[in-house]
Image: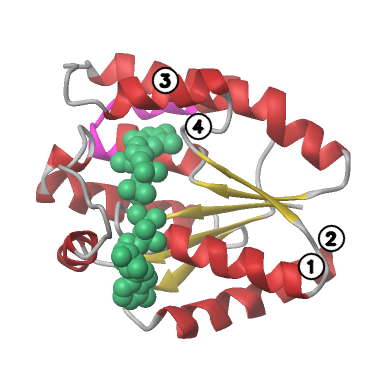
Amino acid sequence: MFITFEGIDGSGKSTQLTMLREWLEAQNKSAIVVREPGATKLSEELRAILLSNKHTITSTAELLLFSAARTQLVEKVIRPALERGDIVLCDRYVDSTTAYQGYGRQLDMAEVEACNRIAVQGLMPVVTFFIDVPYEEAQQRMQFLVNSAEPDRMERSGKQFFDRVRQGYLTIAHQEPTRFVVVDGVRPAEAIHLDIIQQFQSVSLRF
Ligand code: ADP
Ligand code: TYD
């Protein structure tokens, strides 16, 4: 079973992913956890380039680099894991590209969708949890991160950009209400986790 987590930077999605993984482990169900971009050597190197403040990257180059990192991860890790019957939890996936490069950078949506299609070759999650928090709340949460470094290249994109990204996610939710679950992220982590478990259990019954 393939499950993804989405949200703007600092929304708390990695926290929720970890809580779900621990809950699954307590049920004797182990899950493979991966993040995007990343989780293969090539994809981690592309991640370093994409997030580095050293580079000025055009929006189209950014789209292609995220897509390249994704296709490597899908072919080398996610698809083989799913074929073995594992549960895969992925921190970000194609919806990040739609929200960030499509709505955020305002690239041509047909081109963004074409890149997404090429990158995943039909492999879509059964459920995506979108942890919805406003930009201001996410910014505040990031300030409390242990070892918080300087904002990376993407995090420097500013409020207007992140407001478009968030609205983009909400548009995806409207278009794909069955797969894309909006979770109110402005609550204690434990309350959000309980919602996610409930949704997970109802999805499990279908698969
Ligand atoms: P993301 O993966 O979306 O960037 P994280 O899970 O790393 O977000 O969380 C960002 C920060 O917010 C961390 O310091 C984390 O402890 C904190 N955090 C996570 N969930 C919540 C929550 N529900 N309420 C308040 N703070 C939270
Ligand atoms: P990450 O550390 O996963 O984000 P977070 O701060 O939420 O933990 O960093 C990945 C960054 O890359 C994040 O700013 C979102 C962005 N991104 C895109 O713009 N497009 C994509 O397709 C993906 C996967 C990520």
Q: Is residue 162 left or right of residue 48?
A: left
Q: Can you identify the residue that label 1 sits on?
A: 204
Q: Is the C-beta separation of discs 1 and 2 under 8 Å?
A: yes
Per the model, the C-alpha gap separating discs 1 and 2 is 5 Å
Determine crowd level at label 4: few under 14, some 14-19, many 20+ residues with C-alpha closer than 10 A: many
**SS at badge 3:** helix
Is residue 207 or residue 157 the one in the foreground? 157
Looking at the picture, which amino acid does disc 1 mark? Answer: Ser
In the orientation shown, which residue stands out farthest toward the front?
Answer: 147
Determine the main secondary structure of the stretch shown in magenta: helix
- In percent of width and height, residue 74 lies at 65, 29
Please determine whether, in this image, residue 84 is positioned above or below residue 147: above
Q: Residue at x 62, y 62 (%)?
A: 178
Determine crowd level at label 3: few under 14, some 14-19, many 20+ residues with C-alpha closer than 10 A: some
Q: Is residue 99 visible?
A: no
The residue carrying mark 4 has its beta carbon less than 8 Å from ligand 2: yes
**SS at badge 1:** helix
- In percent of width and height, residue 172 lies at 44, 51
- Quadrant of the image where one finds ligand 2: top left
Looking at the picture, which amino acid does disc 3 mark? Answer: Leu
Q: Residue at x 65, y 80 (%)?
A: 198
Q: Can you identify the residue that label 4 sits on?
A: 38
Q: Can you identify the residue that label 2 sits on?
A: 207
Is residue 143 or residue 200 the one in the foreground? 143
Q: Colour mode? A: secondary structure
Q: Can you identify the residue that label 3 sits on?
A: 46
- In percent of width and height, residue 194 lies at 57, 83
Question: What segment is highlighted magenta in the picture?
Answer: 103-114
Is residue 103 or residue 153 the one in the foreground? 153
Q: Is residue 54 left or right of residue 179?
A: left
Please determine whether, in this image, residue 80 is positioned above or below residue 203: above
